[in-house]
């Protein structure tokens, strides 16, 4: 029994009819890995076939998700830490469920999402288990993911973008306009390790694919993202898992 993560002792209610799994591709990765840049290029190529979803912290502040994110940003922490990590975890999980329920697709369209359920799982596990072992943090990440999937299905395909940690940090610092502090560096290192553990634990490369930017240039990454979206969009409808 995990004591560091959010408690999930009772099953959450599930409706009587399974929800169809819609064509849904999510990009994951640590800050500064270049997800948003690659997602924008892929969405441009896909055109009207794609419904792009921005990273939750970049959401329009007028709607409910933006208001929640604004509240979590109140302390000025880039990683939405307010000192109440369990509450933050449940709020971010709820936003992921809200996003899934609120997104509408026309026939032939596919969602391309910048960060999804795995982001909530790994970042919040890294925060909740800051002084615990990586194995404990990974167990907590899986608990958070299990909690989330009682309310919404996982993406049809998840693409994990990885790169040289030094380059990721440099991009992060350019985007924020300041040096990463030691706590942020440690957090991102733990998050990268947790993503790697998920990649090793999930056997289906079509459901969880790694794009290594030390081996693939940007054009090749965009090609792989577009191919994943087209593959998912053309697949027969499935039932929610």
Image (cartoon, helix red, strand yellow):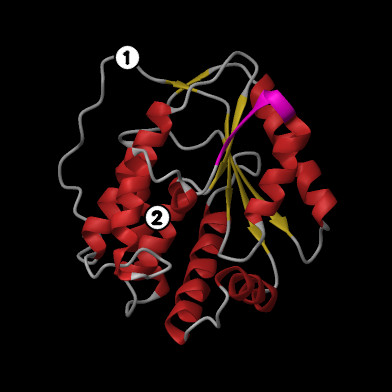
Q: Answer left or right for 230 relative to 172.
A: right
Residue with the most extreme front position: 62
Q: Quadrant of the C terminus?
A: top left
How many C-alpha atoms fall within 10 Å of the one at disc 1: few (<14), some, or many (≥20)? Answer: few
Residue 49 among those drawn in magenta? yes
Q: Note whether 156 is above or below 141 in the view shown.
A: above
- Secondary-structure class at tag 2: helix
Quadrant where the image shows the N terminus = bottom left
Q: Position of residue 140 (x, y in %)?
A: 33, 60
- Residue 90 x %, y %: 26, 50
Residue extending farthest left: 10
Residue located beneath label 1 in the image: 17
Residue 127, image quadrant: bottom left
Residue 97, above or below 15: below
The residue at the point 32 percent across, 39 percent down is 64
The quarter of the picture where residue 34 lies is bottom right
On the image, the x and y values in percent for residue 87 come to 22, 57
Q: Nearer the viewer, residue 218 or 17?
A: 218
Residue at image point 56% right, 64% down: 30
x 28%, y 49%: residue: 91
Magenta-colored span: 47-53
Q: Nearer the viewer, residue 174 or 217?
A: 174
Disc number placed over residue 121 in the picture, else none: 2
Where residue 2 sits, quadrant-wise, is bottom left
Question: Is 152 situated above or below 95?
Answer: above
């Amino acid at each position: 029994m995990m004591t560091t993560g959010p408690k999930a002792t009772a099953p959450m209610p599930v409706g009587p009819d399974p929800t169809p799994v819609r064509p849904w591709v999510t990009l994951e990765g640590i800050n500064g890995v270049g997800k948003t840049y690659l997602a924008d290029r892929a969405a441009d190529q896909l055109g009207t076939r794609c419904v792009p979803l921005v990273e939750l912290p970049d959401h329009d502040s007028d709607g409910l998700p933006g208001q929640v994110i604004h509240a979590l940003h109140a302390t000025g922490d880039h990683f939405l830490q307010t000192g109440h990590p369990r509450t933050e975890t449940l709020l971010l999980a709820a936003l992921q469920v809200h996003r899934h329920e609120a997104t509408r697709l026309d026939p032939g369209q596919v969602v391309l999402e910048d960060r999804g359920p795995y982001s909530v799982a790994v970042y919040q596990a890294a925060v909740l288990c800051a002084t615990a072992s990586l194995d404990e943090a990974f167990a907590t990440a899986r608990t958070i993911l299990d909690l989330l999937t009682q309310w919404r299905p996982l993406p049809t395909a998840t693409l994990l973008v990885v790169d040289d940690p030094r380059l990721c940090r440099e991009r992060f610092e350019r985007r924020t306009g300041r040096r990463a502090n030691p706590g942020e560096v440690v957090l991102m290192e733990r998050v990268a390790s947790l993503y790697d553990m998920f990649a090793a634990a999930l056997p289906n490369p079509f459901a969880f694919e790694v794009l290594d930017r030390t081996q693939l240039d940007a054009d090749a990454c965009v090609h792989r993202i577009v191919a994943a979206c087209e593959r998912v969009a053309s697949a027969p409808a499935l039932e929610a898992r």
